[in-house]
């Protein structure tokens, strides 16, 4: 018998986030993002994230789930959703 449906469950990963001890507020996040975005194009790479977060850097495999458009670059919005609780990232 060939199974029609995969048994693997899709995790609703967008509901999760990755807490970082020194990223608690939008101000913290802005310092992190603009500090990491050396060429100021609004996108940072995994390596740039790693340079700033150091040993708190999540694994590349885990972080890839938050690269919503799968372009291997992390935008401000993508990372805000990764690191901040929802009530902190509403755009005003
Ligand atoms: Ca992206």
Image (tube, rainbow, N blue to C red):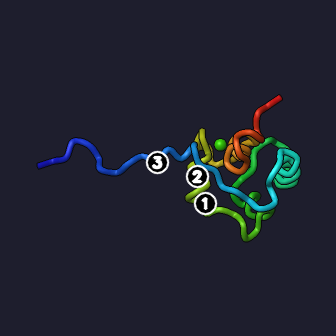
Residue at (78%, 64%) from the top-left corner?
51
Q: Which residue lies furthest to the front in this view?
A: 87
Residue picked out by circle 1: 60
Marks 1 and 2: CB-CB under 8 Å? yes
Residue 38's tag is none
Q: Which residue lies furthest to the left in this view?
A: 1
Q: How far apart are marks 2 and 3 (CA)?
A: 14 Å
Q: Which residue lies furthest to the top in this view?
A: 92
Residue 63 on image: x %, y % = 61, 54
Marks 1 and 3: CB-CB under 8 Å? no
Q: Distance between the residues labelled 1 and 3?
A: 17 Å
In which of the image's four quarters is ligand 1 placed?
Answer: top right
**Mark 2 crowdedness (10 Å alpha carbons): few <14, some 14-19, many ≥20:** some
Residue at (50%, 44%) from the top-left corner?
12
Position of residue 7 in the picture relative to residue 4 (left or right): right
Going from N to C along the chain, the mark reached first, 1 or 3, is: 3
Residue 58 on image: x %, y % = 65, 62
Marks 2 and 3: CB-CB under 8 Å? no
Residue picked out by circle 3: 11
Q: What element carries label 2?
A: helix
User: In the rendered view, would you say 34 is above or below 58?
Assistant: above
Image quadrant assignment for residue 41: top right
The answer to whether the residue bearing label 2 lies less than 8 angstroms from the nearest atom of ligand 1 is: no
Position of residue 12 in the picture relative to residue 87 (left or right): left
Q: Which of 81 and 39 is in front in this view?
A: 81
Residue picked out by circle 2: 64
Q: Is mark 3 on a helix, strand or loop?
A: loop
Q: Which of 26 and 72 is in front in this view?
A: 26
Q: What element carries label 1?
A: helix
For discs 1 and 3, the disc positioned in front in the rendered view: 3
**Mark 3 crowdedness (10 Å alpha carbons): few <14, some 14-19, many ≥20:** few
């Amino acid at each position: 018998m060939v199974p029609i449906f995969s048994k693997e469950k899709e995790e609703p990963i967008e509901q999760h986030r990755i807490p970082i001890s020194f990223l608690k507020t939008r101000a913290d996040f802005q310092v992190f993002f603009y500090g990491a975005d050396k060429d100021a194009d609004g996108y940072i790479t995994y390596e740039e994230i790693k340079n700033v977060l150091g040993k708190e850097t999540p694994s590349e495999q885990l972080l890839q789930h938050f690269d919503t458009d799968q372009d291997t670059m992390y935008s401000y919005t993508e990372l805000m959703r990764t690191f901040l609780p929802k009530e902190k990232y509403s755009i005003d």
